[in-house]
Each structure stands twice: as C-alpha cells, then as structure tokens.
Image (cartoon, helix red, strand yellow):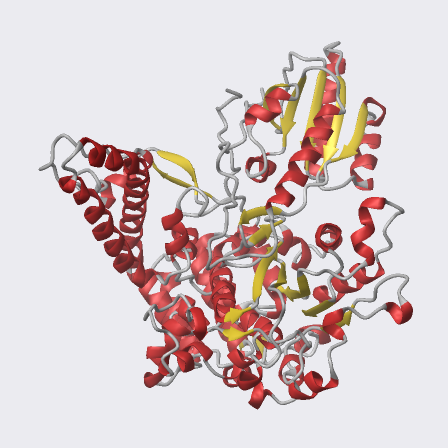
Amino acid sequence: MAATAAVSTSASDDGTSKPDADHEYTLDVSQLKEVARKGLVDALNSVNGAKTLVLDPSLAGPLGLVTEVALLKHHGVDKMFWLEPGPLSASTTNIVYLCRPLIKWAKIIADQIKRHARESQKHTYTLFLVPRTSTLVRQILEDEGVLGDVNISSYNLQFIPLADDVISLENDAAFKELWVDGDETVVFNSMQALITLQRLYGLFPRIIGKGDFASRLANLMTRYIPASDPSDSLLDSASEKIDSLIIIDRRTDMITPLLTQLTYEGLIDEMIGIKNSHVELPVSLLTPPAAPNPNQPNAPASSSAAPPPAQTLMKEKKKKHHLTEATDPLFGELRDLNFSAVGRKLNQVARRIDEDYKLRHQAKTVAQLRDFVGKLGGLQTEHQSLRLHTGLSEMMVPMTRTDHFNKSLEIQQNLLASYEITAQITAIEDLIAQGADMQLVLRLLCLASIIAGGIKAKTLENIKREILQSYGYDFLPMLLSLAAPPLAILIPNPLPPSTPQSVAASKFPYTSLRKQFRLLLEDPDQLEEVENDISYVYSGYAPVSVRLVQCVAQKGGVLSNPAEKERKAGGDADGRKGKGVAGAGKVQAHPIVGWKGFEDVVASIPGATVDIVQKIPGAPDGGLPPVASMSKWHEHIWRYPAGLTSCCAVAPREQPTTTVVFFLGGCTYTEIAALRWVGRQNKGRKFLIATTGIVSGSSIIESIAGIERGSGGTKDAGLQ
C-alpha cells in the first residue's frame, strides 16, 4: 500500500523576510509565492468535494515552501499519499494526482487505475502535471487504456522564493536533463518562468547571456508572443525596476560547482545536505534552551547554551529544519561567511547575548524588571539560534579535519594554480585506493580534465578501470556520460580523431582566463585581500560565473578589487571584512551596456554570447528602453575598461535598480554568496538571483549516476 505523505513546512517559514537598511531589494519576491499558492488552490478547487491527494515525492519539498498542510486540508484534501508502485486505498471518490510529467509516474498511475477497475472501485481521477501538460504522458495513458478515465490539467509551479534575493524552479534534474539526456524541456519551462517575472515587473530592457542554452533561452523569450490578456499589459513596457537579465549557462563554468564550497551555507550543503532549504539536524539542537530566571540574579546566562558534543549529535535522531533568514537572523549573518570566520562570529554573538542577559542585574525596580522581561523573548530566540549554529558548526569541524577532505582541498588548490597536474592526478588515484567517496574522486578528476584540457589517454583509461573495479560497474554509464557531448568534461588529451568537433570546441581556456579574470590570488601579498574580494568564498578563487556577471554589472571589479582600493583609501570606516564596503565606500553602479570591454575574453569561453536589447511592442522603431538609449558619451566611456572605476559615479541613478541573474542548470550557495558580495559593493544596483535549482559537485555527479536524494518529506507522516 502506498505510504502516507506530508508536506514539510511551517506556516511562518516562508523563505522571505523584510529587508533591512543594508539589504533594500527593489523586488518583492513574495509575490511569486502567492502566485504559486493561488495556482495550487485553484487547481484543488477545480475538483469538487473531498479528495485524496497522491503526490510526486520530489514535489513535497518545493510545495512545502509555498503552502502548508492546513491550507491543503482547508481546500478539501482528506488524505495524502506518495505516488509510488503498489495498490492505492482511497476513502474518497475523488483522487487527485500531482506529479512531474515523467514516464515512470504515468505508468504507476495507469496501474493503479486499472487495479481499481478490477476491484470494482469507482473513483474520479484528476491528474495535474507540473509545470505543464505533456503529450508523452497522454500517449502513455492512452496506450495503457486509461486516458478516458483521467482528467488531465496542469499546475504551473514556477519560481519559488528561497530568500529575499534568491528564487528557484527547484528542478533538481535540470542539469542532467540538459547535458546528459539532451532534454531541453527545462529551457522552455525557464522561459515561461522568466516571462512571469516580466508580467509582474515589466519587460527586461536587455537580455545578456553566455552559453549555447543561454542563447536558446534568450531567443525563446524574444520570440514569445503573449495571448491577448489584460494581465499581460506590463509586457508592453520596459521594466522600471529591472535593468537587465543576465543568463549564465552552467556549462560555461563547470569548475566552480566541482570545487568544495567553503562558505558556511555551502559547507552545510556539502557535508550534511540542504534540500529545498531544509536540513536534517539532531533534535537536541532544535530544542530551545532553558531561559535564565530573572529572580535568580547569580544564575549563569549561558549555562544552557552549550550544545551536546559533536559525537553525541551525530548519533541523535534527526528532524527537518528550515534554514531561513526570516526566522533566524543569525543565519543571515553567517551563511555567506567563509567557514574559517564562523567561529569568530559566533563568539562575538555569544559575548553580546551574555552582555544583554547581564542587564537583568541592573533591574532595580519593578518597571525595569518588566522591561527586561519584555526583551526576554528576543534574547531567547537569539540564544536558541546561537546554540543551533554552534552545534551545527561543531558537527562539521570533524568532517573538515579528515585526511580525505584536506587532501582534496590541496589537490583543488594545486589544480587551480596549474601546479604539477600529473602529480595531482596521481594523488586522485591514491584517493581511489584509499576508498575515498566516489563523488569526491570524480569531482577532482573532472576538475583536472577541465583545467588541463584533458588527461593523457592511457592514464585516463587506467583511472576509469580503477573506478569501476572499486565502486562497481554500475557507474559505467556515468563515465560515458561525462565524456560524451554536450557535457564532455572528462576527456582524453589529445582527443582521438573520431572525436566530434563539438567536444574539441568545448575545451575550457582556463590558463588565459585565470590571468584575464583574476581567478586566483597567487601573490602572497594578495592573500590579505581575499576577504575583500569574491574569491573570499573559495579562499582565493573567484568563480568564473560571477566574473562573467561582473563583466556586465561591475566592470571595474574584474580588473581590480574595488573593495581593497576603498579600504586603503579609508572608505571602509567600520573595518568590517567580507561584508563589503559600507556607506560612502560603495561604488555607484554603472549603466548596463553589455559585454563592452570584455568581448574578446568572453568570446574565448565555449558557447554562444548573447546581448539583446528588447523592443517594446507597438512603439516607434521598437521603442528602445531607457537604459539602452543613453547618450553616446556613456557608450564611449565603456569601451575603455581602464577608466571604469573612476567613471562609475559620473551618472548617478535616480532610483535603485535590480539586475536578474539566471543560472540555467543550477547554481551553488557560494555563487549566491559571491553575488551578494558584488551587490554590497554597488550603490544603486541589487541582484535577484534566479536558478533552475541549487547544485553542488556531489549533486551533479549523483544526478548523472542516477542516484536520487531524499524526497523532502517523511514517509510515515500524515496530515495532522
């Protein structure tokens, strides 16, 4: 019998928060959550009466970010079950299936309907496909002889807010579908989601992108002809809040996701795993500590703050927890820090909370005591947050001290510096012999192949043989996929004569990019600048993808470090590191003028280069958006990168603007952290980070290998 399911969420954990003064985002992404919630409610209401909901397990996590079980129950859902093979016992007449349009789900649905028919059970079946209907699913149901028994419709689930500056399609399979299966459905789905953004905020004045699939997505968007609908009126005018859309094809930068993430949030994803913004943590960390008693002035304030030892935590029962800045402000301060700085930050917070608790000693009158008790709730929340993140950090510290972890970091740093590539490949072979994790080995091997332009054919064949003998021949299809186009990130050098031209053309020019994009801080004197540059997220390496964004939105930041210049000039008055230059030290954002100044270096990266100025329908000559009709003087300035930094503040903007950065194929938490850093350096421009999903090196390797991660729900839980 199908197991009962529940959507993992809480009413208050909505993934969004009100921005503070330093995070003034011009777009309210909570509208996207309301769009998703309304679409689900409308779909459920289209089926009259009580209903049994049969849910695709991969949708439980995304749905948990936009709705809660109580809302589903309010709209007629009596019980919920996972969509899985086997009989389905439903107590209601209506059965509603909600799933992605995959062959395996269509066959399971057909089997359950036919079983009910054999058992003379009468039900009304409704199938909602996410995000749109599929001809293939209809054909399968027709072949199975049940198409006439099912009402097929769609639930257009699109962008889901993960934070106030991050929205995601939460499609974990997007990378594999595009670069392994050759299924471009995700490109069309991304187009629809981006069109929805334009419906809410107006036409993107400019679309800029890098990569072949980025080019296809941009062309789809410009060819889109909306149906006659009054709600599409914003598609006839340029957005006043968004200045451009930058599309980054994941294939243009495969180095970044293969590296080990070193930010706090990124390392949590690497070590423990974050699924749909949820992480499984020991129950004791989620239990609030006992508050100090105001009537006992000598009681230590922090006596209950210390979490259990790491070894104890690892053995405890786990519970899902929503990591969000909305309910945990401390997480917002920690998530983008390099893990090496997290301990120092936690210590500062602990001292501050301890000082706040000591204020109770100064409460001499009843009124003063009442004031302290009024603040106690906030202190308890901070106290619990500190306890949670202290315990979480202590759980990860032993993992970061293992021989395999440190050896992998050493190999990565040497590969990025192009230091003795052959010796690094030998070190990877040693990891195989030592029984290191399969994902770790393949990440390092693919990284070496990309950076070196391939691995010697004989050496590569020997390593593949060792991998199959050590980890099993089930991984042979994965090795073939890593070497085949369009992915082709594990290739021999030189390439065999029979190799397709597309593979040869996809070789990554890492050596030249390393210098032109300042990807690596190699000079020992530059290491002091790490905390003031985007390379801070990888302890000395700047993600290529974020450098590409800087080529468009912060041109001076590619050539030099604006934060370091401002710091030396006294701009960083408060002395904060890793958080960007504050106040007057910020650099005025320059206009978006495409790839100007970086055409040659961007063209050297494999994949198409996109720069499209969108035309306004019905306007004379297409009605160029205001950002594209700037004076020729601006156009002339941006031809010369050498003068970029000094020019940035010449033309101040009347109002802040937002640049949307869309990662087609997924992005990492470290790239999000780096883009936030760039946003803090600019005055007048914020970034809205959009993606098909959150990825890491392990998740990419697992998806290619066909290893499925957790379902995002609890299998034996039911509607409460």
Residue at image point 19% right, 49% down: 355
User: Vertically, is 452 above or below 475?
Assistant: below
The residue that appears at 65% across and 75% down in the rendered structure is 591
Q: Quadrant of the N terminus?
A: top right
Residue 478 versus residue 632: which sits nearer the camera?
A: 632
Indicate the position of residue 506 as horizontal and vertical percent values.
65, 74
Is 550 drawn above or below residue 28 in the view shown? below
* Residue 652 on image: x %, y %: 60, 74
> Would you say 30 lies left or right of 366 here?
right
Q: Position of residue 112 (x, y in %)?
A: 70, 22
Q: Residue at x 68, y 15 (%)?
A: 50
The reply to whether residue 277 is in sight is yes
On the image, which quarter does residue 300 sit in?
top left
Left or right: residue 274 versus residue 311 is right
Left or right: where 560 falls relative to 151: left
Q: Would you identify the image quadrant in which residue 412 lies? A: bottom left
Q: Is residue 500 shown to the viewer in this render? A: no
